[in-house]
Image: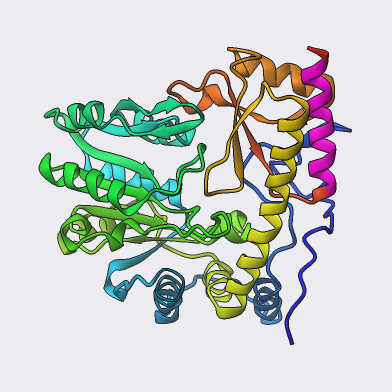
């Protein structure tokens, strides 16, 4: 019997210490990458079963954890991972910070493609490394990589790492294999470690499949660190579960040492069970139902805004549940605009300026919520834009 999932159901997340919903009355949060849907029931079931055995001490990592990851990548992306490549970590960002500390040196340079997830900048600068920002080219609603600029930064003697986002947050780009190959070959050419954050892998538009960086070539994989997690897909960030995948033996042992030294290699009581429950056939069915629902939400926003405020341009890319919206015909200060939008209407979006690069006139809109809330948010947004 096929399971039915009610993504229209609105969950009251008040009084739960939710970062997203720690808001004032009548505010509508559509900012941080945190979904409002009920978690896939299989995850809830294994957590309930674990609670029935009421002791919550230290935990080990069973072989079934790695096997679940291997099966997921093989079944969904036809990509074979080896168990020896996989290491548990409490989260992608803790992993990235730990890897920076262990694999690079103080004052080394780390390259990013901007605009990009803002915490990348924090992970680099907070650890005493220099940010090298290669701005992507934005033209007629599309982004592309300035490979001349990228290579000039990768070739610098102080550059030791590139941090990549696949699919890309915030622009929603699902990178094609040719682009990944070109980036990987540049990193090989200039002896730069490539760290790829692939946390948004599963949430792609209908008809679009993400390409794991690790699937491009064995030569590229030899320079590659891939960070993965079910937390964005299944909205379980609070359970702190992820993995770092590294084919190169020597590089993997350096990273393993760092993860252990930084005390982020030990799972909490629910971290293992949650990932294993997610990465199943039924979990895969749930993800595809989710993607259909997200498609409807995205089309609703795009169609309404195109019809009622055509001066707003939406970057209709292929991945994540985050819309990237160009307001350059309205404002060149997205921070001020988002502050006024929130104070006037209660709609809470992310200003594009926080993601660096040429994004000062953009906003990021999280559409992973019920359609009724999407309708409310669009009404608020259109009213505000028209009144200004």
The residue drawn where x is 29% and y is 54% is 225
Using the rendered view, name the quadrant where residue 338 is placed.
top right
Closest to the observer: 323 or 39? Answer: 323
Q: Is residue 297 above or below residue 384?
A: below
Q: Is residue 325 above or below residue 388?
A: below
Q: Give how far across and how far down residue 5 sits, in percent.
A: 76, 69
Q: Inspect the magenta stretch and tell me whether residue 373 lies in it.
A: yes
Q: Give how far across and how far down residue 89 sits, in percent.
A: 42, 59
* Magenta residues, start to end: 372-386
Give the left or right position of residue 103, taking residue 5 as reference.
left
Q: Give how far across and how far down residue 142 sits, in percent.
A: 47, 33
Closest to the observer: 14 or 204? Answer: 204
Q: Is residue 45 above or below residue 306?
A: below
Give the left or right position of residue 146, taking residue 299 as reference.
left
- Main SS, magenta residues: helix
Q: Which residue in the rendered view is the most extreme toward the right?
A: 26
Q: Quadrant of the N terminus?
A: bottom right
The residue drawn where x is 55% and y is 56% is 203
Q: Which residue in the rendered view is the most extreme toward the bottom?
A: 1
Closest to the observer: 136 or 336? Answer: 136
Using the rendered view, name the quadrant where residue 250 is placed.
bottom left
């Amino acid at each position: 019997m096929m399971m039915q999932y009610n993504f229209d159901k609105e969950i009251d997340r008040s009084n739960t210490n939710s970062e997203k919903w720690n808001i004032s009355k009548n505010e509508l949060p559509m900012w941080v990458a945190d979904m409002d849907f009920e978690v896939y029931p299989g995850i809830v079931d294994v957590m309930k079963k674990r609670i029935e055995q009421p002791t919550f001490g230290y935990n080990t990592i069973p072989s079934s954890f790695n096997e679940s990851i291997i099966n997921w990548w093989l079944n969904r992306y036809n990509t074979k991972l080896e168990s020896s490549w996989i290491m548990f970590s409490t989260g992608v960002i803790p992993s990235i910070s730990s890897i920076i500390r262990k694999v690079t040196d103080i004052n080394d340079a780390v390259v990013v493609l901007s605009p990009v997830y803002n915490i990348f900048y924090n992970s680099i600068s907070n650890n005493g490394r220099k940010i090298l920002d290669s701005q992507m080219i934005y033209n007629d609603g599309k982004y592309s990589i300035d490979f001349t600029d990228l290579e000039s930064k990768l070739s610098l003697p102080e550059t030791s790492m590139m941090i990549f986002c696949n699919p890309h947050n915030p622009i929603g780009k699902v990178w094609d294999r040719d682009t990944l190959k070109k980036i990987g070959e540049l990193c090989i050419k200039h002896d730069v470690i490539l760290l790829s954050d692939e946390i948004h892998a599963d949430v792609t538009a209908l008809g679009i499949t993400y390409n794991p960086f690790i699937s491009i070539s064995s030569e590229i994989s030899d320079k590659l660190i891939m960070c993965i997690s079910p937390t964005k897909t299944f909205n379980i960030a609070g359970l702190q579960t992820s993995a770092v995948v590294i084919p190169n033996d020597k590089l993997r042992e350096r990273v393993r040492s760092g993860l252990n030294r930084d005390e982020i290699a030990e799972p909490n009581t629910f971290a293992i069970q949650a990932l294993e429950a997610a990465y199943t056939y039924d979990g895969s069915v749930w993800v595809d139902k989710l993607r259909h629902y997200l498609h409807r939400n995205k089309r609703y926003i795009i169609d309404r805004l195109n019809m009622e405020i055509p001066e707003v341009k939406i970057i209709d890319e292929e991945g994540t549940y985050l819309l990237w919206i160009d307001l350059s015909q309205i404002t060149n200060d997205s921070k001020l605009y988002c502050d006024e939008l929130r104070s006037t209407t209660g709609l809470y979006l992310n200003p594009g300026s926080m993601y660096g690069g040429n994004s000062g006139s953009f906003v990021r809109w999280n559409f992973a919520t019920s359609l009724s809330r999407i309708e409310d948010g669009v009404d608020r947004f259109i009213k505000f834009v028209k009144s200004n």
